[in-house]
Amino acid sequence: MGAIGRFFKDLNRNKAMLLMVLPASLWFLFFSYLPMAGLVIAFKQYRVSRDGFWASIVNSDWVGFTNFKFLFSTNDAYIITRNTVLYNVFFIVVGLILSVGLAIVLSEIANKRLAKVYQTGMFLPYFLSWIIVGYFVFSFLSLDRGVLNQVLANFGVDPINWYSDPTWWPVILVVVFLWKAVGYNSVVYLAAIMGIDRSLYEAAMIDGANKWQQIRNVTIPMLKPLIIILTLLAIGKIFYADFGLFYQVPRDSGPLYSVTNVIDTYVYRGLKATGEIGMSTAAGLYQSLIGFILVVTSNAIVRRFDKDNALF
């Protein structure tokens, strides 16, 4: 009875905090944990039944790992895996450098009102849907009226059919992603920088440290735990791709599949063509399982060298 009493006492004492996390907890419960029961579909030949979702699962035939063959038995398996992993590695590394750098630059602007204007301007692209961003990109790359082709024409260069030439699309996709995401990601690091004790910088200045030395010896070390945590979480999604970026921006152009086709777009096209829900579930399970292994492995490596900064 004493343990129960202490439980309700702690519950009452922390009720404000618990209410704050309640919406996020419910979101994870209904959209992340409860749907896990449907993972069994990855091992079944799922067929929709009039008796409802659970009856459809129970009555569907068990096919084992057949659904997973969709990802691994085709000629595109290497291409979609390569594209997904390499793009995400580049997004993580370059995005981290630019986000931290941008946060440091914003924190050093003396006019804080002007800094907020810059921050807002760099934050806005994150709220644009990929459909709108895709039309923006099309306005630059259109064969007939695209801005870039008009500029090339002024220099006597023939127009380029960008949506049929995969040469430049790795660069285009990276630039578009960074333009959309870096401003948003920098806000987290900027908040962390604002929380650094100012006395550390004052002590560094007394010791004769210039601005670069203050950043290298104070700002970066203080950001290190946050950088490690966010990087570990990003590694967990390294086998996931931003569907809108790789589907909407290239406008689902067939000639670009060699550099724009990733696991998510490949599964979507397969699902649209075959209607095999079990196949798409198998792909999602594969991505989640690999992500889990990568997070645990990366965290173990970090824990080995710096236990205090490990995720768990």
Image (spheres, rainbow, N blue to C red):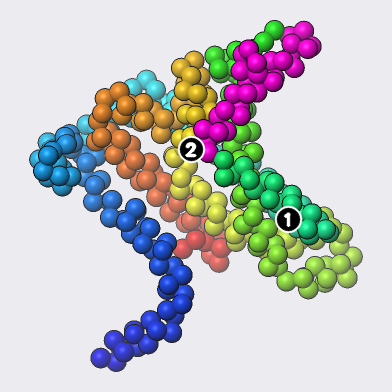
Is 150 situated above or below 78?
A: above
Q: Is residue 151 magenta?
A: yes
* Secondary structure character of the magenta stretch overall: helix
Is 110 situated above or below 262?
A: below
Residue beneath the point at 51% across and 52% down: 232
The crowd level at tag 2 (other Cα within 10 Å; few <14, some 14-19, many 20+) is: some
Q: Nearer the viewer, residue 283 or 124?
A: 124
Is 248 situated above or below 54?
A: above
Coordinates of residue 275 in the picture (x, y in percent): 26, 28
Front disc: 2 or 1: 1
**How many numbered marks, from 0 up?**
2
Quarter-of-image position of residue 145: top right
Amino acid type shown at disc 2: Asp
Which span is picked out in magenta? 129-157
Q: Is residue 241 magenta?
A: no
Coordinates of residue 75 in the picture (x, y in percent): 37, 20
Amino acid type shown at disc 1: Lys
Residue under numbered circle 2? 242
Residue under numbered circle 1? 116
Q: Nearer the viewer, residue 88 or 290?
A: 88
Coordinates of residue 196 in the picture (x, y in percent): 70, 68
Image check: 288 left or right of 300?
left
Image check: 210 left or right of 38?
right
Label 2 and label 1: CA atoms lie apart by: 28 Å
Considering the numbered disc 1 on the image, is that residue within a helix, a strand or a loop?
helix
Residue beneath the point at 68% across and 58% down: 190
Outermost residue toward the bottom in this view: 2
